[in-house]
Structure formats: structure tokens, C-alpha cells
Amino acid sequence: MAEYLTYNKLKEKIPEYLNRYDDTVINNIPFFIMLAERRISRDFKILGTKRFINGTLINGENLIAKPNRWLKTSSFAISVPAQYIEDTYTLEPLFDREITFCQLYWPNVQVLDKPEYYADFEYDQWYIVPTPDKKYNYTSSYFEVPVLIDESNSNNFYTDELPDLLLYGCLTEACGFLKDITLESKWGTRYAKSLEAAMAQNQSLVVDAQNRRGS
């Protein structure tokens, strides 16, 4: 029978690998798992966590709410009328800039025009300049943090596709918490090697997808 990593299985395996069953470890296992998932999200942007969103910019409003669990924006484009072809629209990319650049480029947000740039505004909003002069449809691709695993959600992308990376991440976080430098280095090395292998595999998927689109 095939073995699958789940939240409860991970809680069971972490003490076994650490050979520690005391309350200090057991009570902090959910914390170790959460830290490991966050670490993977920061270290590795993968196809399985890339999402697309469509929406409409609001005339005169230059702040847009980001999707839940947003991690990093990959692209942002607006739909504009195609030249010379009636009732046809094309996607026109907005360029990613720092918030300071956008504020200096368009200091008076009350002045409206066709958007050209976007920036991250804090964690949960995009900042668009110039301030939209129309209700442009937009599409954005972004990377997200998967729904984190817990008692009510036993599986996610990491448990299904990257179980070794998740396990090694948990063990690295646990050993750091326990201040065991030797074991932290051991599991950190395994985490790094697993991450490298997963990134190479993901890159091959990206290249394969690009080749299919070009064929």
C-alpha cells in the first residue's frame, strides 16, 4: 500500500527522526510545521503554487486588494482596445516598480490616465499609476502560499509533491528551536539538497511548458 504524507503522519514522524518525545518537542510540532511551510514558500516559487486572477480596475482608484495567500506577483496586465481593429482588445503589461518610484512618477493621484506601472503596497495591496481613467479589465499571475496543513486540512501541495522537503524543513526548524547546532546543520543540508533537486525538476517543467507553447 502506497504511503502518503499527511499532517498527522508528519506529527508522528518528526519525534521519530529527532528521537525526542518530550513535551517541549510534541507541543511545538505545529509551530515547526508552520515555519517549514513558510520557509518553502519563500525559498521556492513553483508551478503548483502559481495562480491567475482577473478583475476590473476602478476608475479613479489606484489601490487594488491582492488575493488571499498572495506571496509574489509574477505579472500584471490591463486590457486595452487594439489599434485599427474595432471591438478587439489586447493585454498591455504594467511594469513592476518600487513604491517610491510610483509615488514620484505620479505624485498627484487625483489626476487620471492609462496605468503604466504597479508596485507592492504593504502586503495586501497593489499600487497602480497613473490612477486609472477607465474601468480597465486586468489579469495578474502570482505565487501563493498553499493552504497550510493542520488538523482540519491534512494535505496540500507540499505534502503531495514535496514530502521530503517539508519533512527536512520541519526537522531543521525543530533543531534550531532546540539549539542543536549539529543536527540543525545535518537536516539543513538535506533540506538544501532536496530544494535544489525540486528546483531543477520545476525548471524542467517550465522549459517543457514553454516548448509546448512554442510548438
Image (cartoon, rainbow, N blue to C red):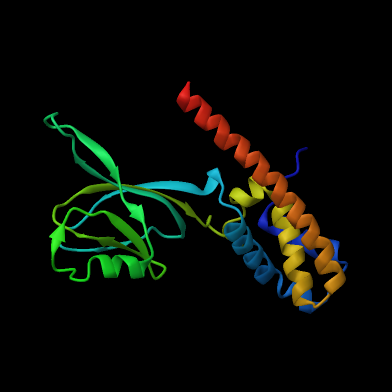
Count of numbered tags: 0
Instruction: Please indicate, yes or no, whether residue 131 appears anywhere in the rendered image.
Output: yes
At x 59% / y 35%, what residue is drawn?
205
Using the image as rendered, state which of residue 185 and residue 214 is in the foreground: 214
Asked if residue 90 lies left or right of residue 213, the reply is left
**Looking at this rendering, what residue extends furthest in the top direction?**
215
Image quarter hosting the N terminus: top right
Residue 202 percent coordinates (x, y): 61, 41
Say if 207 sits above or below 47 in the image: above
Query: Looking at the image, is 103 positioned above or below residue 74?
Result: below
x%, y% of residue 19?
88, 67
| Residue occupying image coordinates x 38% and y 58% | 67
Side (left or right) of 72 relative to 103:
right
Q: Is residue 20 visible?
A: no
Q: Which of 77/3 is in front?
A: 77
Q: Position of residue 77 (x, y in %)?
A: 31, 47
Q: Quadrant of residue 97?
A: bottom left
Question: Is 13 located above or below residue 157 in the figure?
Answer: below
Which is more toward the observer, 109 or 159? 109
Instruction: Report the side of 63 relative to 195 (left or right).
Output: left
- How far from the left and from the top, in percent, is residue 166? 69, 56
Left or right for 163, reference 155? right
Dividing the picture into quadrants, the one containing residue 16 is bottom right
Q: Residue at x 66, y 63 (%)?
A: 36
In front here: 25 or 198?
198
